[in-house]
Amino acid sequence: MNTIRILRNTPAHCSRFYGRNFTYNPFLNGEDLKAICYEKESDVFKNKFKNNFFAEIIVLKILYHNLSEEDHLKWNAFINELERRLKSNNLDEIYLGFNNPWKDALQIKIGSPAHSV
């Protein structure tokens, strides 16, 4: 819940996500860490990506994953829009903590069982 509060408050108080390191690190289980650290399994890599927007948005994905299939579709539409805006504004995804293939890590597979937290 603290992660969601921070994600809500950041733009509400005129702060930015781009290039920001969050002071709160969400707890991520092994499955979620794999979504962030799919290129390397080193502790250095995990520490680099644990306190940025990508780690925070993984927590939101977990929340949406436990909702209805209609909400899964809304989430996936949000991820598509996020990708479109990143490309249209020529933003480097690495400054949000995204690494390749970030979109696959954030999409919810329709019909997949609920995520255990």
Image: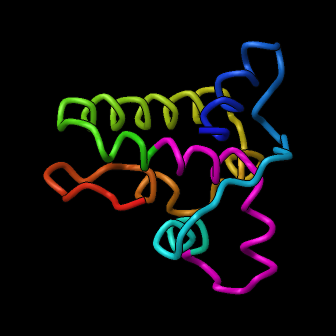
**Drawn side of residue 39 relative to residue 69, left or right:** right
The one of 91 and 64 positioned closer to us in this rendering: 64
Which residue is drawn at the image coordinates 60% and 34% (left, top)?
4
Which residue is drawn at the image coordinates 64% and 53% (left, top)?
55
Count of numbered tags: 0
**Drawn side of residue 62 relative to residue 71, left or right:** right
Query: Was residue 93 drawn as part of the magenta stretch in this picture?
Result: no
Which residue is drawn at the image coordinates 33% and 58% (left, top)?
115
Q: Position of residue 19 (x, y in %)?
A: 83, 42
**Drawn side of residue 112 relative to residue 13, left or right:** left
Q: What stretch is highlighted in magenta?
A: 38-60
Which residue is drawn at the image coordinates 35% and 61% (left, top)?
116
Classify residue 81 by image quadrant. top left
The one of 116 and 98 positioned closer to us in this rendering: 116
Query: Was residue 56 drawn as part of the magenta stretch in this picture?
Result: yes
Which image quarter holds the C terminus? bottom left
Which secondary structure dominates the residues rendered in magenta? helix
Classify residue 41 by image quadrant. bottom right
In the displayed structure, would residue 84 be above or below residue 12?
below
Q: Where is residue 40 in the image (x, y as percent from the top left)?
A: 64, 83
Q: Position of residue 75 (x, y in %)?
A: 36, 34
Q: Position of residue 88 (x, y in %)?
A: 59, 27
